[in-house]
Amino acid sequence: MPPRPKTLILPTTIHPSPEQIHDLQSMWSAVLTAQHAVTAFLHHRAAGGTATLLAVASSPSQPITASTAHLQLPTLAQLEAEFRVARDALGWSATVPASALRWMLAATLREWRAGGGAPALPRPWPRTRPPHLQLDHAVQLRDDVTLEIAGVGRELAVSADLFLPHTYWRALLRHQHRRNEAHRAHLERLEARWLDQADATAAAELFARRARSARRGTLPDPGREVAGAPIARERVAIRHVDGDGLPPRWIAEWAFGTSELALRKWIHDDVLGLDLGYRHPFAAVSSHHTILVPRPFHGEFRPPALTDRRPWVGRLELARARALHRRSLFLRLLPIYEAQLELALNHRVVALEAMAWAGFARRHLAFADYAQAVGLTNWVEWLGELAPQHGVQVLTVPPEYTSRTCSRCGHIGKRPRSGRPFHCAQCGHVKAADVNAAAVIRARGQRLLGTR
Ligand SMILES: [Zn+2]
């Protein structure tokens, strides 16, 4: 039997407008309302009740009195059947795609199974829980930097930083092209039914679909299908992320299937020390490598302000222009990202500083903004997702004084001035500052492993 393809989840940041955030939040609010009804229903069942989900959802004032004594959980199929009735009667699916509700049902049932027999049965999800909308095929690419979230109410075209490794981006494009081809074939069939068979329903559907697809953008050519390349799955989640030190943000999570074959194991039984930075996006040190990669562009990474002098640029166009601006920087860096990712995945262990993103913001340093704008934070996420698949261990080491410590003798001196090499006052060691930092990070990784 061939090995099952593995699933990788790669996130990209999206930039919804305030109105779009409102729409996403109302979707989430509808999911929570449905989730509370399902939880009340499960509590009712756990207490030995026999009412339907619709009955429980329609009278939410029923007290929750549950005991594990009667705990007989329905199967997912049974729960889905109950849910469909309540969903249609109460209009839940009018505001949120079916896939988001299906995900909620499965997740809720999982929590109950995990908590089965525990003294306290699961409570409803708190209203403060960050949104997680499983939107699957309702999310599509419109062009290089635009996502379309369709399926519910008004259409949402959201600017996104579609920062993905090349092969995964291609996989997404190929998937989208296949969808578009199927869409085109469907339109042709509708047209034939309208013109050849005088089918008025087909004419109406064709008319509506043509009106919608007129707004579609153009996608880049996905290129030839390559054997062993990852496959995009129609499993997309939109989530709100907060609390990792970076500014709160919305992300789209893309699921890809990857064959075991493509995920070969590491080859160097060694620790790679990596220092990420502004002047040099990467400095990498292992026993065989010393690599210092300069930033492949000059100047300011922030887009020029357009709003003051160009009032005709609308808010959505501006968001799109900014996303294209970030994409240009990302594409300059992409070959470097891929080479460094490959280098990292070739080592048994990769040591990185624990990224104190909040610290940069506190010290009014632009590095966190920069790292987000050009995709360096995404690169760290790629590594985190791909490393386990390649059998690679990622170590985060304490970040204190990495740029002030001598990688040869361990002496802590002064931080070298920007652009100047590290110079040890104790042993005289002189090294490019970022390479010295990468070597210190590597040594800390080795200490964590107990190999030194
Ligand atoms: Zn020294």
Image (cartoon, rainbow, N blue to C red):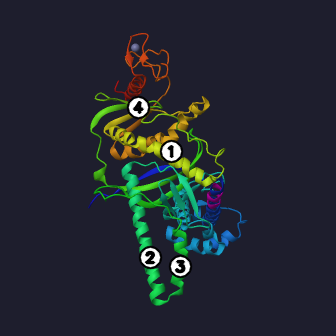
| Residue tagged 4 | 294
Residue 283, above or below 161 = above
Q: Quadrant of the C terminus?
A: top left
Magenta-drawn stretch contains 288: no
**Label 1 – label 4 distance at C-alpha:** 18 Å
Can residue 275 be seen in this snapshot?
yes
Which one is earlier in the sequence, the residue at label 2 or at label 1? Answer: 2
Identify which amino acid the numbered label 3 is placed on.
Answer: Glu
| Residue tagged 1 | 326
Identify which amino acid the numbered label 1 is placed on.
Answer: Arg
Relative side of 335 to 147, left or right: left
| Residue tagged 2 | 186
Secondary structure type for disc 2: helix
Secondary structure type for disc 4: loop
Residue 205 disc label: 3
CB of residue at label 1: within 8 Å of ligand 1?
A: no
Nearer to the camera, 207 or 58? 207
Answer yes or no: do the residues labelled 1 and 3 have beta carbons within 8 Å? no
Identify which amino acid the numbered label 4 is placed on.
Answer: Pro
Secondary structure type for disc 3: helix
Q: Position of residue 1 (x, y in %)?
A: 26, 61
